Amino acid sequence: MKKTMLCTFGLLLAACHDEPTMTFGLEFRVAGSETGALTSQFCSPPGEYGGLMHGSSIDDWEIDEPPPHLFLEAEPDAEENVYRVQVYVASELEEDGIWWEPSEVLAERTYDSAFGESGAQDSFVVDFEEQQYTVEVLGLPPDATCP
């Protein structure tokens, strides 16, 4: 009886949740040109919902160091099954004091399911404060997990 109730509860939860999810994920690696070492690495796994933005600061700075700073953000759009990726310079915090306000967009990319599900790779370079940052983007197929 307990197994039947648990199974029924699981099916009920699945039926109640009809929001689309991403069929692929993306892994990001960013290296600075001065040392070639990674300055940032993060991952958005397959199965993300729309509107759940992932991001990271990609230049090397201390908490109390004044802006500008460099950020990379990836926003999944599960309705269209694409990630919209932006690298931007931020000079001040938004009104809520939590998120940085983009002041200059240095690069924008959109990655679709053909890219992600095939495990494709892309890279591009952005210039910030006399240094170049190489952003590597790797597609993660539906059965992949974040490293």
Image (cartoon, rainbow, N blue to C red):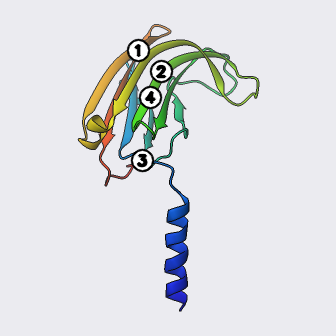
Q: Residues within 10 Å of mark 4 (few under 14, many from 20)?
A: some
Q: Say what amino acid the circle numbered 3 marks.
A: Pro
The disc placed on residue 87 is 2
Q: Position of residue 29 (x, y in %)?
A: 38, 33
Are dots 1 and 4 in contact, CB under 8 Å?
Answer: no
Location of mark 3 (residue): 45
Q: Say what amino acid the circle numbered 1 marks.
A: Val
Q: Which of 12 and 48 lies nearest the eye of the viewer?
A: 12
Q: Residues within 10 Å of mark 1 (few under 14, many from 20)?
A: some
Q: Say what amino acid the circle numbered 2 marks.
A: Val
| Mark 2 to mark 1 CA distance (whole Å) | 8 Å
Location of mark 4 (residue): 84
- Residue farthest toward the bottom in the current orientation of the protein: 1
Are dots 3 and 1 in contact, CB under 8 Å?
Answer: no
The disc placed on residue 24 is none
Are dots 3 and 4 in contact, CB under 8 Å?
Answer: no
Residue mark closest to the camera, 3 vs 4: 4
Q: Which of 60 and 68 lies nearest the eye of the viewer?
A: 68
Q: Residues within 10 Å of mark 3 (few under 14, many from 20)?
A: many
| Mark 3 to mark 1 CA distance (whole Å) | 24 Å
Are dots 2 and 1 in contact, CB under 8 Å?
Answer: yes
| Mark 3 to mark 4 CA distance (whole Å) | 14 Å
Counting residues from the start of the chain, the first of labels 1 and 4 encountered is 4
Q: Secondary structure at mark 4?
A: strand
Location of mark 1 (residue): 126
Residue mark closest to the camera, 3 vs 1: 3
Q: Position of residue 130 (x, y in %)?
A: 46, 7
